[in-house]
Amino acid sequence: MGGGGVKPKKIPERKCLGCGEMKAKSSLIRIVRSPEGCIFIDKTGKANGRGAYLCDSIECFAKCRKAKRFDKAFNTPVPNEVYSSLEGLIGKSNG
Ligand SMILES: [Zn+2]
């Protein structure tokens, strides 16, 4: 019994909240709402709380903001100032 096929490694994918495309988890940014209610960008990917994934793209962020998708993802109203502070951090990693 047995068989010796090597399974290809599966890259974990997540759906971008903005464009709705499935992308490699490592290429997305994770935004977390902590149990205390803080909303922040989780650079380690290990923070506790409810997470949402997004391309590191201001366009995807703008779509989320417009449709208030974070409110739905986090099941809580996200204050405008939180959107604004996140906006300042997105799309900056490439330069
Ligand atoms: Zn996207």
Image: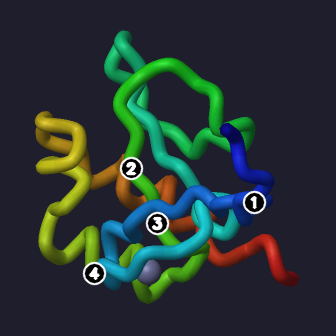
Q: Residues within 10 Å of mark 3 (few under 14, many from 20)?
A: many
Residue 91 position, x and y percent, is: 65, 77
Name the residue carrying label 4: 63
Residue 73 position, x and y percent, is: 21, 47
Q: Sequence order check: which comes first, mark 3 or mark 1?
A: 1
Query: What secondary structure is marked by label 2?
Result: strand
Residue 7 position, x and y percent, is: 71, 59
Q: CA distance from mark 4 to mark 3?
A: 10 Å
Badge 3 amino acid: Leu
Disc assigned to residue 52? 2
Badge 4 amino acid: Lys
From the viewer's perspective, tell me whether residue 60 is left or right of residue 40. left
Q: Nearer the viewer, residue 21 or 44?
A: 21
Does 38 appear above or below 40?
above
Q: Residue at x 40, y 70 (%)?
A: 16
From the viewer's perspective, tell me whether residue 11 is left or right of residue 83. right
Disc assigned to residue 54? 3
Is there CB contact under 8 Å for labels 4 and 3? no
Q: Sequence order check: which comes first, mark 2 or mark 1?
A: 1
Disc assigned to residue 5? 1
Placement of the C terminus among the 4 image quadrants: bottom right
Question: Does the closest atom of ligand 1 sit within 8 Å of the Cβ of label 3?
Answer: yes
Residue 90 position, x and y percent, is: 60, 68
Q: CA distance from mark 3 to mark 1?
A: 35 Å
Q: Residue at x 38, y 81 (%)?
A: 21
Q: Which corner quadrant of the image does residue 45 belong to? A: top right
Q: Which corner quadrant of the image does residue 18 belong to? A: bottom left
Question: Does the closest atom of ligand 1 sit within 8 Å of the Cβ of label 4?
Answer: yes
